[in-house]
């Protein structure tokens, strides 16, 4: 990776990934793009351009102007939003991906896009979900992710595009709140604990899902993209996770720092149904063996850092 174009750069992953990429590869070598303006730190710490990923011509022009050799395609509608407008989700998630793959093919650029635990469905083994298994998701987002995995493999096999991907679990971060996901509760619970000492969860007690701290997700993207391509057997896309948790397990860890924290429930049937169609825990052996994946944050370490950083964010006037 030397000259990188990131789509969806102002989203939950992009807003942190861009900053790390700029540290590692040089700010001028990381072009951040998004369909809207937003986080000033991302827009002002290096090149930023407005880009609607449905505009392939514009994407190609930007890639040419910035001599891009790597595309990290993050722009997509997440699971809950996609269920509210499935046709828009299909058009954006698949149309945007195809445009990014075509630009990568034209430039022989390396390519990354995330898949998700959402790419699995009710008939997928729920515990220690294998790297290669049944993928019959029942959500539009999941259908987009499975189709996206297959499309990325196709561009590798047919055109030689160096495509790589990760099946992300729910990602937990303090900088940019996620938008429209099913796992967003696992971010909101920390914000609720720090700001109000309470949280009303829309996901039911005992609903286990894979989760990972954002810094582990970012490290996984860079490690995968820098890995020797000859070692990669699975490419699109690797199971990666750090923990399998439910609202109660997160709450118990929060109470070690905020003893009075109160958790209650108001289950959202739509997002609960999505969560129940996903695995409880994934097997990450392939990622560990083929490119050395290793998560550094468990629930305890992540909770300590989330609470510390959120207190700074909400209560320290000097906080960015
Ligand atoms: C979502 N955060 O909830 C995303 C992610 C594994 C979940 O794909 O839709």
Image (tube, helix red, strand yellow):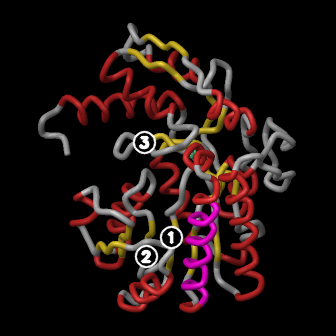
Is disc 1 surrounded by few (<14), some (14 to 19) or many (20+) residues within 10 Å? Answer: many
Residue 198, horizontal then vertical, whole percent: 40, 15
Given residues 181 and 187, the one toward you in this image is 181
Provide the residue designation for mark 3: 173
Q: Which mark is residue 72?
A: 1
Question: Which residue: 82% across, 48% down?
Answer: 130
Say whether marks 1 and 3 touch (CB < 8 Å).
Answer: no
In the picture, the disc for residue 302 is none
User: Do the CB atoms of the residues marked 2 and 1 lie less than 8 Å apart?
Assistant: yes
Give, as a single range, the part of the protein colored magenta: 90-105
> In the image, what residue occupies the spot 80% across and 35% down?
127
Count residues near mark 3 (Cα–Cα under 10 Å), then give few for <14, some for 14-19, many for 20+: many
Horizontal side of 121 relative to 299 (left or right) equals right
Is residue 312 shown above or below 124?
above
Question: What main secondary structure does the magenta stretch of the protein show?
Answer: helix
Q: Position of residue 217 (x, y in %)?
A: 52, 52
């Amino acid at each position: 990776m030397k000259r990188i174009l990131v789509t969806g750069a102002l989203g939950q992953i992009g807003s942190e990934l861009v900053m790390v990429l700029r540290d590692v590869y040089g700010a001028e070598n990381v072009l951040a793009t998004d369909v809207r303006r937003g986080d000033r730190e991302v827009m002002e710490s290096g090149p930023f351009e407005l880009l609607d990923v449905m505009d392939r011509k514009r994407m190609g022009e930007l890639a040419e102007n910035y001599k891009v050799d790597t595309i990290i395609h993050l722009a997509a509608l997440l699971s809950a939003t996609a269920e509210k407008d499935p046709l828009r989700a299909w058009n954006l998630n698949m149309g945007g991906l195809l445009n990014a793959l075509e630009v990568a093919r034209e430039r022989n650029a390396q390519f990354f896009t995330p898949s998700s635990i959402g790419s699995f469905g009710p008939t997928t083994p729920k515990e220690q979900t294998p790297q290669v298994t049944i993928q019959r998701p029942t959500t539009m987002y999941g259908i987009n992710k499975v189709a996206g995995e297959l499309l990325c493999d196709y561009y590798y096999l047919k055109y030689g595009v160096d495509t790589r991907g990760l099946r992300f679990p729910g990602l937990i971060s303090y900088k940019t709140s996620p938008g429209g996901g099913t796992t967003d509760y696992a971010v909101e619970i920390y914000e609720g604990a720090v700001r109000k000492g309470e949280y009303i969860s829309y996901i039911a007690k005992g609903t286990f899902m894979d989760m990972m701290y954002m810094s582990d997700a970012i490290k996984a993207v860079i490690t995968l993209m820098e890995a020797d391509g000859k070692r990669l057997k699975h490419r699109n896309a690797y199971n990666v996770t750090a923990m399998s948790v439910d609202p109660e397990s997160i709450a118990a860890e929060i109470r070690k720092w905020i003893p009075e924290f109160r958790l209650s429930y108001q289950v959202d049937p739509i997002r609960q149904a999505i969560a129940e169609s996903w695995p409880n825990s994934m097997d990450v052996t392939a990622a560990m063996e083929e490119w050395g994946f290793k998560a550094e944050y468990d629930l305890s370490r992540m909770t300590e850092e989330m609470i510390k950083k959120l207190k700074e964010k909400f209560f320290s006037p000097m906080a960015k």
